[in-house]
Image (cartoon, rainbow, N blue to C red):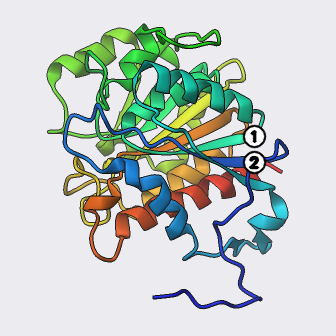
Amino acid sequence: MALSQDPLWPRAGSWPAFDGEADAVLLGVPTWQTSLSPTGAHATPGAIREALQRYGTTLMGPPILDLADALTIQDAGDVDEPDGDEGEAATIARVRELAPAFVIALGGDNSLTYPVALGSAASGLITFDAHFDLRDGVSNGTPVRRLVEDVPAAATVPTERIDPRRIVQIGIADFANSAAYARRAADWGIRVITLDELRRRGIDDVVAEAVEVAGAGDGPVHLDIDVDVCDRSVAPGCPASVPGGLAAWELRALTRAVASDARVVSADIAEVDATADTEDGRTVRLAALCVLELLAGVAGRI
């Protein structure tokens, strides 16, 4: 069904191509080939762009603010074939070309976090995720470990590892991880804020700690939004989402709050499989709203 058109109600999405003068820029990074479970996540960047057009760009405030007035928002298209050594190198280089704009990378599975964080030269990392992503090897279950231990094989620009003591993982859930990886996180000094702790303390308190830990020394910080941190009722298009995860409003509030800190320079949205979503597209729509919450956070810095 075609969306209605109203000149007094501009829609999100369909932003102009990147021309080097942007406050924030979208970049599709459709990783999927190393996923631990079958996925159609490579179809997700296009689906998110389409879903964005269902929404407006106005914050109710007060004061009322239109993101299109506050920010220059552009779209850099997709990285072709971002998987593998050459794909990672291309992603790293492309993210660096987009600086100093705030980069919003549309995944793709969670393996995109590795090259996007390296491309933004992040020295700190915040993840919203039910999982540690500390596995060995190369997959959507390994990006956090790789950021601590690996150097990209085909990178054409210098990259640095992230000190694990500058990593904060929010939303880590019971029954979604192993004791071995929990011990690895503890041994490395990663700050783990479980789903239960988040709910006991509240969003504002947790975000304040997270940005101070990850952004110590003025950042820069990369934010990984793994949508499978959410309850399966709102994220059925995430293969690993489980009952009892975050509500949609909680993910949106966390996203805007972290993006409001100027030390956060980039973000990715991961683990949404647009081909596995429900008929109403609720998972992709939530991912699109996370894009808008990131933009709202950036606009709030001004």
| Left or right of 289 on screen, residue 261 | right
Q: Nearer the viewer, residue 180 or 69?
A: 69
Dot 2 surroundings within 10 Å: few (below 14), some, or many (20 or more)? some
Q: Pick whichever, 7 or 194, lies toward us.
A: 7
Mark 2–mark 1 Cα distance, whole angstroms, equals: 10 Å
Q: Secondary structure at mark 2?
A: loop
Looking at the image, which residue is at 36% across and 63% down? 283
232 relative to 285 in the view: left or right: left
Q: Residue 25 placed where, x, y %?
A: 69, 48
Q: In the image, what residue type sits under mark 1?
A: Ala
Amino acid at pointer 2: Phe
Report whether 198 appears left or right of 10: left
Work out whether 199 lies above or below 293: above
Q: Nearer the viewer, residue 63 or 28?
A: 28
In the image, which is nearer the foreground, mark 2 or mark 1?
2
Q: Is residue 213 visible?
A: no
The residue beneath circle 1 is 101
Splitting the image into 4 quarters, where does residue 66 fall?
bottom right
Q: Quadrant of the N terminus?
A: bottom left
Mark 2 or 1, nearer chain start = 2
Say whether residue 120 is left or right of residue 112.
right
- Mark seen at residue 85: none
In the depicted structure, whether residue 118 falls above or below residue 209? above
* Location of residue 139 with respect to 39 vertically, above or below: above
Number of other residues with Cα within 10 Å of mark 1, as a class: few under 14, some 14 to 19, many 20 or more:
many
Q: Are marks 2 and 1 in contact (CB under 8 Å)?
A: yes
Q: Is residue 69 above or below residue 163?
A: below
Residue 243 is situated, as x and y percent measured from the top left of the image, at 19, 57
Q: Where is mark 2, residue-wise? A: 18
- Measured as percent of width and height from the top left, residue 226 is found at 39, 44
Residue 78 in view of the camera: yes
Look at the numbered disc 1 and give the secondary structure of its residue: loop
